[in-house]
Amino acid sequence: MHELISKCQKSLITVDKYYDAALQHVRGELIVNGKLSRDNLDREQHAAHGLSWVAAYRATLKEMVNWASNLDSTGTFNETEQLILQITFSEYCAQIKSGIPMSQLEYVRPQDLGLKNGLFQETGTEEFNDLILNGNSTADRMKLAQLLKDGFSSKNFGNCGLDETTSIIQEQFRKFVEDDVTPNAHEWHLKDNLIPMSVIEKMSELGVFGLTIPEEYGGLGMTRFVDCVVTEELARGYIGIGSLGTRGDIAAELLITGGTEEQKNKYLPKIASGEMLPCAVLTEPHSGSDMGSFKTRAVANGEHYTITGNKTWVTHGARSDVMMLLARTNPDEKGYKGLSMFLAEKQRGDDDNMFPDEGISGGEIEVLGYRGMKEYEMAFDGFQVKKENLLGEKEGNGFKQMMETFEAARIQTAARALGVAQSAFETAMQYAIDRLDTNGGSLYDKPRNASKIVSMATEIMAARQLTYYAAREKDKGHRCDLEAGMAKMLAARVAWACADNGVQIHGGNGFALEYPISRILCDSRILNIFEGTAEIQADIVTRRLVSTNPA
Amino acid sequence: MKILVPVKRVIDPYVNIRVKSDQTGVETENVKMSMNPFCEIAVEEAIRLKEAGKAEEIIAVSIGNQSCQETIRTALAMGADRGIHVLTEEKVEPISIAKILAKICESESPGLVISGKQAIDGDNNQTGQMLAALTDMPQGTFASKVEIDGDKVKVTREIDGGLQTVNLNMPAIITTDLRLNEPRYASLPNIMKAKKKPIDQKSPEDYGVDVTPRVSILKVIEPPKRQAGIKVENVGDLVEKLKNEAGVI
């Protein structure tokens, strides 16, 4: 085994010890009489969420070692990949030791997790300390910067570790995106256009919408892992393109895990072919993450349910054919248990007539970024849904059914974040290389510019390996809400950091609407918010960590 | 009818080529490789002919090291039916490629061989013509349009003065120019189907061809970098500089 890989492995021993100590502390704070105390979780939120970040870093570093070992075994662990591994380990171990940014303003420090300062002096392995001290030198960073620059024209920023088939898939989607998406994305954004149907039709032909749907229902039955690779490439062109499939994904997961055989046969083939575009109608004006307090009512009425209430943040609400609609069927149950999920068909609307159906009205919510499908608020007043469109034809399962989709949707969202991060990274790098200063050199020759690029490349690879890991766990049929949550949380933070620093490299031009990096900044901002905010993800991850019996 | 399509693995056209520091060639380590763009056009044309009912089977051939398998797999994902991989670590020159292809033509008897007009690595533009000579088949090079009519194929060629149309008896050899078609992306279902399509592995010895290079490369160097120009004050200065500095008059 490569010397660096074994060094990283040995430094993981310290990371494990630190994590175990932090877990024990947080458990002590949150578990009362053998049960998780909600009050304590709220009071100790900083430490509790901090634990989830420590866990995410630990999982990431483990995956980086696995990634490197796999490359090493095929003789492809070259200098670029070595430096990515080394710098990631050095930086993340240093952050674990001194403070991990949960956001730009909130750091989780060892003392927040009840750990005394001396912990690392006592228990840090030689390798852990050496990597922190010597693994991230300016010389090494500049060497990686040069290698990244050499690889720029072939978009070779380190081997992601894909097999032959997945590489072909990646290459084909990259071509599609370079030809049909990248040249148009900025205009779609600036004009706030819906993504043209011709592009959606091309994506249907390429098989995007049926990717993970089982073959017996008209899909391709491919893995979540392949979906990650495809999604990253699509989102690299435009976040909206990488997000078109998300709705189909959620609808398909709902049907597969909660639908009746008739419902599966009726809807899955149409979703797989792209003939039917779904939208998720969940959030209400007064509550988003807290689904238990949803108020929209579904009242049984002969062969129908009558829907009344207000929904908001419906992505692609107008130009979609079927709604995943969460509404309260039982008003006596105030919490989750009173909710039911409907797959309610609707007519496709457009900019002039957004909601042609009787009983639905609404309007567009203008947004900073993440355009292309548009956001809507919708008001339901007597809208009729057939009884057969109640998912699973049983009331009261809506929340549980929705929960079943979170793993897949969050992994897919992590992959979207990777694509946005990658586009910020490449756009910033192009600018830094092209922009000349008065001495005839380029911006890229300035270490603080090149160093930003190096951090982007290493963090994107780290978040990518964690995302791949979550996807592979899902493909094995393992429960992976933990891994999905960590991947989404990290990838979203990385995307925002890449976009923000990408603008910085552009200087004043990055602030001009004319430059694509301004759009990427806007697009990346949503990633920490939708599909479960960064705070909600941390909450979910921590609950799992402290509730699981110690291994 | 069978169509034989040779596909070459080359450095991706968007990559900045770098010369190796020892001047023995260009850097290929860690460099992105793709199917030669003209070969992609050849594969696409073969698929279109098959879709139009003019051909039954498309065979993609690649000659080179192990990684050429991926190039064949890409051709299969686009729509070719099976592959032949002639495995060799040698740097194979056009004459050896043409000899191997000639042998494959003997055993497969294709109605058409459609190849790229040249590969963007060596820009040799020789293989198709050499193959025509070796097999005594008619050739239509630099094709921008291909129409099959019975046992004849009409090829519109892009030549310096405009377009030339040739009528060839089949079997024939066609080499593709840039404007013949726009190659498709391989869709996910087709990429999955391609995994099950067979690739026959062969060696140059199987065809009795000696691929030892006949040309030896002395050294490879980068073209000189273009120098920045200067502005001269008047015609006198210009003439003086052209005479004494540039030495062109």
Image (cartoon, grey):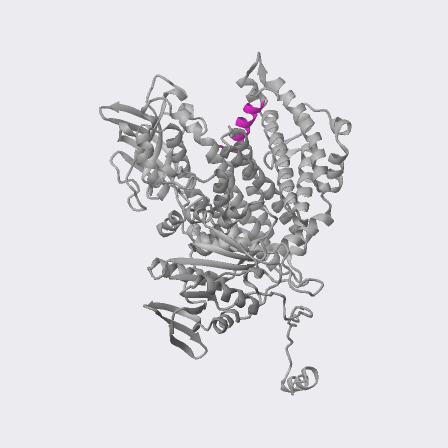
Report the residue that reaches farthest toward the left.
Answer: A302
Residue A229 vs residue B46, the one in the foreground: B46
Picture quadrant where residue A311 is located: top left
x, y percent for residue A25: 65, 21
The answer to whether residue A551 is seen in the rendering is yes
Placement of A318 over or under B171, stated as above or below: above
Please check the rendered image and state whether residue B47 is part of the magenta-colored stretch, yes or no: no
x, y percent for residue A306: 27, 27
Q: Residue at x 49, y 52 (%)?
A: B199
Total marks in image: 0
Which stretch is magenta? Answer: A531-545
Q: Main secondary structure of the magenta part?
A: helix
User: Which quadrant is home to the N terminus of chain A?
Assistant: top right
x, y percent for residue A245: 42, 42
In screen coordinates, is A143 left or right of A274?
Answer: right
Residue A299 vs residue A229, the one in the foreground: A229
Placement of A159 over or under A313, stated as above or below: below
The answer to whether residue A113 is seen in the rendering is no
User: Which quadrant is home to the C terminus of chain A?
Assistant: top right
Placement of B229 over or under A435, stated as above or below: below
In screen coordinates, is B90 left or right of B182?
Answer: right
